[in-house]
Amino acid sequence: MSDLLERLRDRGWRLTAQRRVVAEVLDGDHVHYTADEVHARATDRLPEIARATVYNTLSELVALGEVLEVSTDGRAKRYDPNARHTHQHLVCSRCGTIRDVHPTGDPLAALPENERYGFAIADATVTYRGVCPNCTGS
């Protein structure tokens, strides 16, 4: 589990019914929903929740650093609650499915000194791309 609800409680973030539902929808492993998917799942739990409330809550969670905004290949932004654990993403190039992966090694070390151009590098993002088992029929 991503422990999102626990982190929000620890921060003292006011958990209204709407915010709680959005956080509950996002809580879990390999969660990378679009805002519309969050809204659809949230309305299953709280039918009166407004789309604007979902968008505003997602923006607040991103601003707090509790949720990551993930963009891949010009597709809709997705929201990842796994903001506290270093990870990379594995993306299906056909359907857009995203999975969190935890490769070994330091991606910063993979960039040779002569390719750094004097930058003081603080972070590296690696996205692995391929075709998921559902799309290959395996």
Image: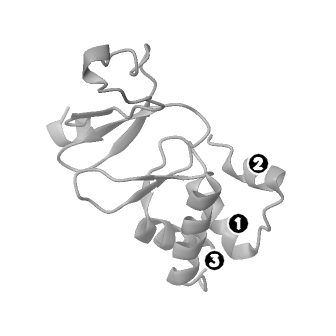
Name the residue located 44 percent from the left edge and 68 percent from the top edge: 35
Q: Which of the numbered marks, if any, corresponds to residue 46?
A: 3
Name the residue located 70 percent from the left edge and 66 percent from the top edge: 20
User: In the rendered structure, which amino acid carries the disc numbered 2?
Assistant: Glu
Name the residue located 80 percent from the left edge and 53 percent from the top edge: 11
Marked residue nearer the N-terminal end (3 or 1): 1
Observer-side mark, 3 or 1, equals: 1
> Is 114 placed above or below 20 here?
above
Element assignment for label 2: helix
Q: Position of residue 129 (x, y in %)?
A: 23, 35
> Is 104 placed above or below 86 here?
above
Q: Which of the numbered marks, if any, corresponds to residue 20?
A: 1
Q: Position of residue 131 (x, y in %)?
A: 19, 36
Marked residue nearer the N-terminal end (2 or 3): 2
The answer to which image quadrant residue 137 occupies is top left
Query: Label 2: few (<14), some or many (≥20) within 10 Å?
Result: few
Quarter of the image with the N terminus is: top right
Q: Position of residue 90 (x, y in %)?
A: 33, 35
Quarter of the image with the C terminus is: top left
